Amino acid sequence: METFWEVILRTAAAFVLIMIIARLLGKQTVSQMTYHDFVVTITLGAIAGNFAFNTYYHLWHLLTSLLLFSAIAYFLSHVSLKSRKSRKWISGKPTVVIENSKILEQNLRKLKLTLDTLNQELREKDIFNIEEVEYAVLELNGRLSVLKKPEYRQVIRKDLAIRTAGKEAFPVELIMDGEVIHENLRRHPELGEEWLNRELNKRNLTLADICYAVKGTNGKLFIDKYEDNIKKPIDKE
């Protein structure tokens, strides 16, 4: 029974430590898995797993290993941030795999990337003909970035000389799950609670009626109510 409670406490402690370490290492480790990040994630996971349930190892030894490896990972992240040469060694560098519709087979071999995988990555970007590709680059996180040839790119408003009405602002969330997000209101004094209350009164709404409210990039207030009034909603399993 004593071992049972020890495993529970160690598991909770491992979870808290990994959360703290993940925050210290930054969002990049979570969102972009470079060589460095991959090694860090795998090793920290293994140490944390032993920390949680392997009672044969001394707790302080595992804690020392976890903290020491985290310190090394943090140091390498700091070094790669400051030095471009070090960054290439620690995280690797992007590799061009297609140039002017020509597949660079030698680079594919270096990356251990097959033509089947390359074609799959292109199809996921709605590219079925390699002749459309000007450049294709395999990024540090393993994703493929593609620059199409000019004649295959989508037309944008600038190409059509259509002027936009003005600069779009970042959306401001105002209400979530029926609760006002006061922090966002404080950051935007031009809004404020009085303004929000007036807008709700105009629509004959109360906080209890609202699931989500946001001031969009176009400056308009969008409100999603709990009552959707949809007679036959789509129910996806």
Image (tube, grey):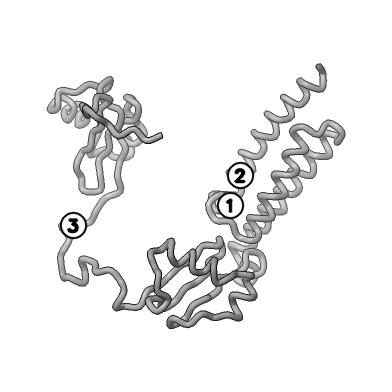
Total marks placed: 3
Local crowd at mark 2 within 10 Å, few (<14), some, or many (≥20)? some
Residue 143: % across, % down: 51, 62
Name the kind of residue labelled 3 in the image: Gly
Residue 166 marker: 3
Q: CA distance from mark 2 to mark 3?
A: 39 Å
Query: Disc 2 designates what residue?
Result: 22
Please report whichever mark, 2 or 3, sits nearer to the chain's N-terminal start: 2
Extreme residue in the left direction: 202
Please report whichever mark, 2 or 1, sits nearer to the chain's N-terminal start: 2
Residue 204: % across, % down: 15, 23
Q: Identify whether 110 is placed above or below 212.
A: below
Query: Disc 1 designates what residue?
Result: 29
Q: Nearer the viewer, mark 3 or mark 1?
A: 1
Residue 55: % across, % down: 83, 31
Q: CA distance from mark 2 to mark 1?
A: 8 Å
Q: Identify whether 3 is placed above or below 109.
A: above
- Asked if the residue at tag 1 contacts the one at tag 2, i.e. Cβ–Cβ closer than 8 Å, the answer is yes
Residue shown at the point (25%, 32%) measured from the top left: 224
